[in-house]
Image (cartoon, rainbow, N blue to C red):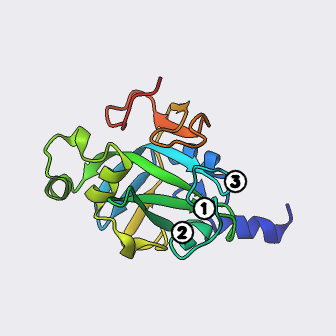
Amino acid sequence: MDASSATARTAHVVAGVDFGADSAAVAQALIGVGVWVGGVGGRIVETEAYDRDDPASHSFAGPTARNAAMFGPPGRADVSRSYGIHWCLNFVCREAGHGAGVLIRALEPTDGLDTMRARRGVDDPRLLCSGPGRVGQALGIDASFNGFALDAPPFALAPRGANAVVLTGPRIGISRAADVPWRFGAAGSRFLSRPFR
């Protein structure tokens, strides 16, 4: 890699995660990373990777007005609608134009729990952010956040502490390419959307 390529890749690093990397590598690296939106958030404990060559990805059919943010640049938020109801938060990775991202499936909530409880209408901290729709609702995510940079307000990311033990398994809640082992989670976390087999 020449110096100009190294400099270009460095520009995609946020909180120690290289968003220029492939989605599976980014999804693993995000386990344990802190994410906050307007001061509300916690540690990422579960992710799923998606790529444009992946029939389960909303970038599979190519760029459209609805999925344009997924095509970069990396280190941005892609906000998608699930089942026409829930706003889901994805982190864009790979080079601009590629169409890859990581779905934030679950957080361990650490900050702004009262705000999350009000948004979600539940008290149990394990139910605040255990699932991608819950994450979106707890963080107050909607379409207006689409394309926002992850290293600028209202977003804030913080590197993970000690290396987490990361579990791997097939993705869930999808009908296509469901056997691809691109779901990642923090071992022993009580805040996963569903246990790993």
Q: Residues within 10 Å of mark 3 (few under 14, many from 20)?
A: some
Circle 3 — which element?
loop
Marks 3 and 2, the one that precedes in the sequence: 3
Q: Which mark is residue 59?
A: 1
- The residue beneath circle 2 is 67
Q: Which mark is residue 93?
A: none
Instruction: Find the distance from the CA under tag 3 to the CA under tag 1.
Output: 8 Å
Q: Position of residue 89 (x, y in %)?
A: 42, 59
Instruction: Find the distance from the CA under tag 2 to the CA under tag 1.
Output: 6 Å
Q: Position of residue 119 (x, y in %)?
A: 18, 59
Do the residues bearing badges 2 and 1 touch, measured as CB atoms within 8 Å? yes
Identity, as a three-letter code, of the amino acid under mark 2: Asn
Identity, as a three-letter code, of the amino acid under mark 3: Asp
Residue that appears at 77% across and 64% down: 6
Q: Residues within 10 Å of mark 2 (few under 14, many from 20)?
A: some
- The N terminus - image quarter: bottom right
Q: Position of residue 112 (x, y in %)?
A: 21, 57
Q: Position of residue 143 (x, y in %)?
A: 38, 72
Q: Is residue 127 left or right of residue 34?
A: left
Marks 2 and 1, the one that precedes in the sequence: 1
- The residue beneath circle 3 is 53
Do the residues bearing badges 3 and 2 touch, measured as CB atoms within 8 Å? no
Marks 3 and 1, the one that precedes in the sequence: 3
Residue that appears at 65% across and 50% down: 54
